[in-house]
Amino acid sequence: MPSALINVPSKAKRGDVIEIKTLMSHIMETGYRHTASGEVVPRDIITSFTCRFNGAEIFRADLYPAIAANPFLTFFTTVTESGKFEFEWVGDKGFSETASASITVE
Amino acid sequence: MIRKSGNRFADKIMRKQRTMMPNSDHTTRRTFLTLAGGAAVLGAVPAVIVRPAEATPAMLSAAIRNVVGEANVRTGRVKLDIPPLVENGNTVPMTVSVASPMTTDDYVKSIHVFNEKNPQPNIGNFYLGPRAGRAQVSTRIRLADSQKVTAIARLSDDTFWSATADVVVTLAACTEEAI
Amino acid sequence: MKFVGCIAILAALAGTALATEIPQADRRSGYSFMGPDSRAMQDDDTSNPGMLWVLDGETLWKRKAGTAGKACGDCHSDARVSMKGVAARYPTFDKALGKPVDLEGRINLCRSNHQQAPPLAYESRELLALTAYVAQQSRGMPIEVGNDPDLAPFVAKGHELFTRRQGQLNLACANCHDDNWDRKLAGAPITQGQPTGYPLYRLEWQSLGSLQRRLRACITGIRAQAYEYGSPELVELEAYLMSRARGMKLETPAVRP
């Protein structure tokens, strides 16, 4: 049941610089922990996050085990037109999740 | 990343004592400062005591070289906001911002964050461009111990700028076993 | 030297005579012991990771479960209305069972009695999510546990457990959380142990967790054998702690270090 929290303003003025906040539920298992019986818990992390606006990439991140569980990322973008932000998280064990948010530019 | 012991409660008290005592960490920190300061000092690393569970200075400098190549890394332009005393190393808020007009001919291409003492030196790479409008990213990171964190920004003219912060990680009492 | 230091700290804690309960005016949420960064994380719903569970809880609230094919919402409609103030009254005395039931217990009773669904495991994502969603509806409302005379004997048992020295360190909960709050242990503040924000997101856990999980961790910390999830002792401790925090505002989903 992976869920994401996306915070994008629904409206903005042309040329505004807006902040985008994203929270994705994920354990971000480092691959450096051991069980009580001594076995290594295999790495299970999100390795990549991408944000596109109307199809064009505006922000991308490579994540490592040092990123805390339930990765939180905030960044900025200049809005020039109305459209759709698409968010994509990709990781180990075939993890792949997407979310989107629309903005109206006046 | 999370250390284990038979009795975490008593162990925390012990570890706190240990961290207050002078130890060889100072050597490591000075080495790191030199690296982060930006001179191409590969090969000039003095002998340090290396604990295997941590990224070694060589691993760290290799990770930085991997990003910057042979370029100089200058101090400045980058601001690294991270609490000097964090309440739990498992979740440390961090913001990196870069002084840049973010115009089509003068902008930040990417921001790279490294640490000194986690098992791996990399924390994250963040790729932006002129349309970001503001060169700033925030996230939450894990720090296995008190250590230095370094952020390096690559600008559109392919110069590299950096900032380093010292972080003291306090360890909560009564923590649970990892798994 | 390490050994001496360890003993000194423990002696400082255990040497103090048991004080009386913290006066109402001095009661402080764990929130007030946190640094500005952790407070900011709790204050902003779009940065509070606990909200991920609340979001899941909202989905589960509407999802049909069990052989009865009913969702929580089929009986209780809109949780934002029907669940308002409910968490502030838990644990509550269940007349049919003749014992106190906490919020997690109530959700599982609802599942078995009304949904004909198997109980959800303690600390499972589903149970934490539903509990967080229900409790979040009471955010900002004062805790009301402690008025019910039927609950009183269980609150008293919880109080007895709270003040009983146990474990290899021979410490009672009260040694830290009544007598030494606002002092530090290994660099971290000792809080009053007010359960105002459960289930809450602990930075240490990197997850949401229940009050029972926190209590079990504390009990393990004093090197005593932790009570099982759902045991009468843990529910009695919860009942005592909630009555001890009476009048304080619920913060679910809180963030703590």
Image (spheres, coloured by chain):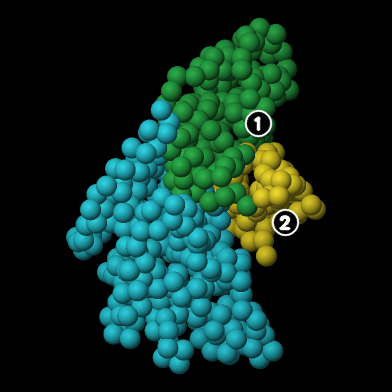
The residue under label 1 is B53
SS class of the residue under badge 1? loop
Amino acid at the residue labelled 2: Glu
Q: Colour of chain B?
A: green
Q: Nearer the viewer, residue A14 or B92?
A: B92
Image position, residue B113 (x, y; %): 61, 30
Question: Which quadrant: the N terminus of chain C?
Answer: top left
The residue under label 2 is A97
SS class of the residue under badge 2? strand
Residue B122 image-quadrant placement: top right
Q: Are marks 1 and 2 in contact (CB under 8 Å)?
A: no
How far is the residue under mark 1 from the one under mark 2? 32 Å
Label the yellow chain with its letter. Answer: A
Residue C99 image-quadrant placement: bottom left
Image position, residue B120 (x, y; %): 67, 32
Is there any visible trace of residue C127 in the rendered image?
yes
Q: Nearer the viewer, residue C140 or C46?
A: C140
Residue A43 image-quadrant placement: top right
Q: Nearer the viewer, residue C31 or A32?
A: A32
Horizontal side, residue B91 vs residue C24: left or right? right
> In percent of the image, x 61 and y 79: which residue is there?
C119
In this view, C178 is above or below B88: below
Using the rendered image, report if marks 1 and 2 lie on a common chain. Answer: no
**Residue lying furthest right in this view?**
A94
Q: Colour of chain C?
A: cyan
> In percent of the image, x 61 and y 75: which residue is there?
C120
> In percent of the image, x 38 and y 53: which residue is there?
C170
Horizontal side, residue C226 vs residue B152: left or right? left
Disc 2: host chain: A
Disc 1: host chain: B
Q: Nearer the viewer, mark 1 or mark 2?
A: 1
